[in-house]
Amino acid sequence: MTTSSTATRILDHGDGRGLQAVLLDMDGTMVDTEDFWWQAETSLFAELGHELDEADRAHVVGGPMSRVMDYLVARTGVDIAPADLGVLVGQRFVDLLADGVPLMPGAERLLNTLAAHGIPAALVSASQRHVIDIVLRSLGAERFAFTIGGDEVARTKPFPDPYLEAARRLGAEPARCVVIEDTPTGVRAGEAAGCPVIAVPSVAPIEPAPGRLVLSSLERVDLDLLRSLVTSRV
């Protein structure tokens, strides 16, 4: 979706050597879907005779689906192939999205701020393309330069590939793209790509670290903060 003209617009941006783009996770960061995923997983496994607990939730939050299903099969011993189990969980999750998806507090304001100042935003998710397309009905596809799904890169989070691909498409330097994530898995991906990271934990706790800012809400993210994270690194 992004073209060379988009990259040119970014590189010509008035921030000079500063902020070029903001790369945003989806589930639990921009939209409040983590509870939907957990509901889909717990309800399905309850029907299969297994009760999942909060310790399991800490393991599965943040995806990707293949890792989550591998964990749940090993944890419960269900006699279902992980890929088939992923289809069942995914369909149940999609059914829960039928009435729309609530945005996280501060998400709409942040997107409006970026648009008003010409800062490109990309949605970089571990979710699969068909799930992203459903969620975009609530988020608004027009708010993003493009979106990347976990099934559209060779290696998804916690590997850096999705964020490196986003920076490449934008013609931007990773060190000048701020990543916003809600899970340890996503934070690792952003940091491995060389991006400054803002963590807004949704389920699993995330500790502060060099190059990583931990906040309680997207409502605390503004343009001055985003710019300061890049200025301190370039």
Image: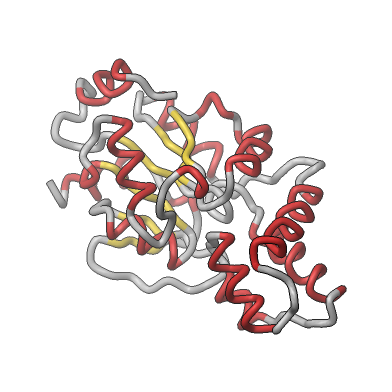
Who's the residue at 48% across and 74% down the image? 205
Left or right, 78 with respect to 128, comes to right
Who's the residue at 57% across and 56% down the image? 28
Question: How far from the left and from the top, in percent, is residue 211?
Answer: 24, 61
From this view, report whether residue 73 is shown above or below residue 201. Answer: below
In this view, the residue in front, 189 or 105, is 189
Q: Which residue is situated farthest in the right direction here?
A: 47
From this view, report whether residue 24 is shown above or below residue 45. Answer: above
**Which quarter of the rendered picture does the N terminus lie within?**
top left
Question: How far from the left and from the top, in percent, is residue 53?
Answer: 70, 82
Res 7 → quadrant: top left
Who's the residue at 74% across and 54% down the image? 93
Model colouring: secondary structure
Who's the residue at 49% across and 64% down the image? 201
Question: How far from the left and from the top, in percent, is residue 156?
Answer: 43, 54
In this view, the residue in front, 55 or 197, is 55
